[in-house]
Image (tube, grey):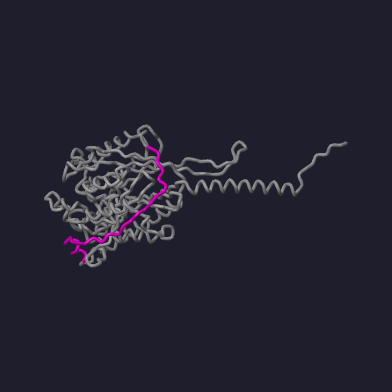
Amino acid sequence: MENKMRYPTLKNWFTILIFILGLICLLGLIFSIRASSAVRVGYDQRDITPTLGLKEENPFLPGKPYNKRANNFQDELTVSALVLDDGFGNILALVSVDAFGLFRDDVQKIRQRVRDIFPDGNKIIVSSTHTHSAPDFLGVYSDSRKDKGQMEDLEYLINQTADAIRSAYKNRNTAEIKIKNGRLGDIIANDRDPNVLDDNVFMMHIQPTKKYFGIIHGVADFFEAKEKPIFLVGFACHPEFLRKTDSLSSDYVGNLRDRLSSLGKNETTVAYPMFFSGALGGMVVPNLRYRFDDKLLGMIRFNNDVQEQIYSYAGTFEAVNISPMEIRTEILKIELKNKVFKNKLEKGLLPHQLDRGKLSTEVSVVFLGDQIVLVAVPGEMSPEISLKIRTIFPDKTVWFLGLANDELGYILPKKKYKEKIYEYERSLAVNDNIGDEIFKSVKRMARK
């Protein structure tokens, strides 16, 4: 008999095609289930530097003399957004903005612009770096809230921040996260009470990975490609090396970010750097040895030592799982007792609306997995309070975000409020009880 080669019929080809498509769909389903419960991270950065022109139209700067305007440019101001997604429907946006401070009203405008992706605005935390060489959007040292140009610059900042959050949300990829909590030691100092210092430095390394489907050596599977990492640092220290100049600058913060974009002395790996200010109130500043007549030289030497200290922890970072996340927020009603602030409010130089003499502000406690606790406070909290809050979470790594979602000035413990060394801080504090109220709020949220 003659052997005849049998070719697949059209029906058989159709069956094979259906099988292949079914296999791809099954792999896609498996991948989507895996990805849905995986931590994802997104990042974006935007420029928020105001344009300089005629001196009489340039932004007001913090400090004396009153209504001092910027006249020079040292380095750019930026806003960075980090979006954390725990894979279980909890999404948090952490924003670091090169600003002297932002009021809660301004943060609410940012939240409103991204309400479609963050319907719960409390899941957006905006922290100012507190550089003293950024525009005085608060109106503490100027009449900025009535200045058309300054308010246009603020609107630009709000829009750029919203765009950064939206882009970071869109750019989420799966990621591996490592952290380290170190110490800065005598690089920083407390100018008021040298015996009380929270010198903790929080560091987080995020390695995003982009997943894709492909066929390699005849094997169909989902593969990963490493993206540019993100390196985050947070500690307490006033950025005020250049505060007596008339230059726009992020102060030591921008220079430090540039340095930390390289992940080690001998490494060429480039990272996206982020910086968050911590509990810097009352008054945490660079050590006296960095204070030169040449302010830039002092800033460079300060960052040399900070960079060296951070690099000393290389190889000691620990992998963590930030899932599940839980975001807890309390709205506090704080009585406004400060006469200077009251006077400005009466003149329309502050945007606040009082409810029976009280301001509305917020405090947040965020649990990132079972190891990290993030505490966001609305101003410049003194180290006495931050050290006390750390005792609430003895087995956790506590990370503070200062000037977060509001700037209500100095936050002191009530028992220290009337001490002579805090005379300046009292002039820029809403009342004598805010520190104790914030501590109690954090304690309540820790117990929920």
As rendered, which of 399 and 148 lies closer to the eye?
399
Residue furthest left as drawn: 420
Residue furthest top as drawn: 266
Q: Residue at x 36, y 43 (%)?
A: 371
Q: Position of residue 441 (x, y in %)?
A: 27, 55
Q: Is residue 380 magenta?
A: no
Is residue 357 visible from the viewing direction of this image?
yes
Specify start and end residues of the magenta stretch as a single range.
318-345
Q: Position of residue 31 (x, y in %)?
A: 54, 46
Q: Position of residue 426 (x, y in %)?
A: 16, 54
As rendered, which of 320 and 200 lies closer to the eye?
320
Classify the position of the N terminus by image quarter.
top right
> For residue 295, which quarter of the picture?
top left
Q: Is 203 left, or right, of 423 in this rendering?
A: right
Q: Residue at x 25, y 41 (%)?
A: 199
Against 239, is 56 above or below? below
Is residue 251 visible from the viewing direction of this image?
no
Q: Is residue 336 magenta?
A: yes
Q: Residue at x 41, y 37 (%)?
A: 269
Q: How many numbered discs, if any?
A: 0
Q: Position of residue 355 (x, y in %)?
A: 25, 67
Q: Is 265 left, or right, of 413 in this rendering?
A: right
Residue furthest front as drawn: 447
Against 71, is 177 above or below? above
Against 260, is 248 above or below? below
> For residue 408, which quarter of the picture?
bottom left
